[in-house]
Each structure stands twice: as structure tokens, then as C-alpha cells.
Amino acid sequence: ALQIRSDLPAAHHNLGSCYLQQGRVDEAIAQYEMALQLDPEYAEAQSNLGAALAQKGGVDEAIAHYRRALQLRPDYAEAHNNLGLALVQKGGVDEAIAQYQMALQLKPDYADAHNNLGTALVQKGRMVEAITQYRKALQIEPADPKTQNNLALLLATGSEASLRNGDQAVQLARQANDLAGGKNPLYLRTLAAAYAEAGQFSDAMRAAQEAIELAQAAGQPDLVARLNDELKRYQAGHPLRQ
């Protein structure tokens, strides 16, 4: 399309989105910027340029583009959600919660916004509300491993005993780990914590050891150190607590 008409903003935007899905972030940014040169009021290009810049660590730039997208389209649920994610990275959890809630007012079946709201509520210590949001996300997308993992971790390690449920945590953590192909150390970490909460410490130690090996292979020394500390807890017969 661009060979025929190089001045089509939508074609530049859509090509950028294809590049972004392939992980070609710099090429995606170039296409989004071209779309905005041609049409500065292209809200979707503003928001998606923000998402690409956030992947490169440009959180402040991303926030500016999300806010511009919302000036152009206040009813843009995805931009509210993306702005919330960026605000969390800057420590603005309260404003992020407000953005997620706005996204859900506009799009009640937005599973990702329910999940992100749940995670923000955990950071504020609002565990009951967080569980509700995770469960709503799973009602919409039952096979989303990210939400399964988040809910499993909360059910396994929550500070309030009344909220913990080891059996449910194991079920969710197993599903998340299976969907991830057993290759995500964070999901295996959650599975280990779930086994420990259920009293299955030998399984917890095995999952933690697998997570350590994957984290070592991925060059994640901080995660390796955390997992080794948690493995020692399981070896001593103690579950993990937030």
C-alpha cells in the first residue's frame, strides 16, 4: 500500500503495529512517527507510539503520548489502560488505578484492564478487591496465563490467612505454567509457592529448583538470589508470605 501511496497514515500505523508484534521496536517507532507526521491527531498512533517507546524505556515520553491520545479520544479504553501501566512504573499507583477504572467504565469486558487493576490494588494492600479483579479477568479470558499466575501468587502468599487457598493456587499455577511451556521462571516461582501453601514441599522444592535453573540460563542474578532464598524456606517446611 505504501509503495502505491506513501502518504497514508493508516498504512504507516498498521505496518508499525506489525513490526511491534515482531519485536522490531525501532522500526515500529519510525512508522508510528511517520503516521503522526501525516496526521498529528491520529489517536491510535499516539497511543501505540507510547507503547513502543515504553518498551525502549522511554516511560515519560510514553505517558506524554498516552495523554495526547486521550485528549484526542477521551473514550479510548486502551490508552487509559496503557497510561495506567506507565504510571505504575513511575510510582503513580493511585492515578493508575483511576485510569484502569476509567478503561473498565468504557469497556467492562476488558480483561487486561481487570488484571492490571488487580495488580495495582495488590500494591495498595487491597487484597480482596484485587482477587475480585483477577477473577473477573479470568471470567472473560479463562486461559490467560498472566492473570492465572497473578491470582495464584496472591492465593498462595497473601498475608491474610482467610484469603489463602493452596489447592486453588496450585490449580491456577499449574495452568499458567503449562500455557507458558514450563519455561517461565516467574510462573515456576508461583507454582513453587502454591505447592508450599498446599503443604507439598517436595514439589515446591522441585519447582523452585527448575525456576532457578531457568533464571540462571536467562542471566537474571537478582531473581536467582530471590529463588534461592525461597528454596531455603521450602527446605525448612515454611510457605512463602508476602
Image (cartoon, rainbow, N blue to C red):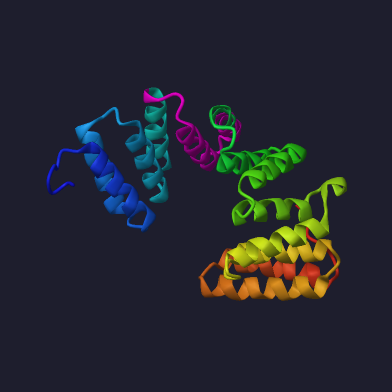
Q: Is residue 226 visible?
A: no
Q: Is residue 168 above or below residue 160?
A: below
Task: Answer left or right for 156 relative to 225.
Answer: right
Q: Is residue 83 above or below residue 226?
A: above
Per the image, is 91 magenta? yes
Task: Answer left or right for 118 relative to 199.
Answer: left
Per the image, is 95 magenta? yes
| The magenta segment | 72-100
Q: Is residue 71 visible?
A: yes
Residue drawn at (12%, 46%), measured in percent from left and top? 4
Residue drawn at (53%, 75%), measured in percent from left and top? 217
Q: Residue furthest left?
A: 4
Residue drawn at (36%, 35%), measured in percent from left and top? 44
Picture coordinates of residue 33, whole percent (x, y): 25, 40
Q: Between residues 190 and 179, which one lies in front from this camera angle?
A: 179
Q: Is residue 238 above or below residue 123?
A: below
Picture coordinates of residue 233, whole percent (x, y): 79, 67
Q: Quadrant of residue 97?
A: top right
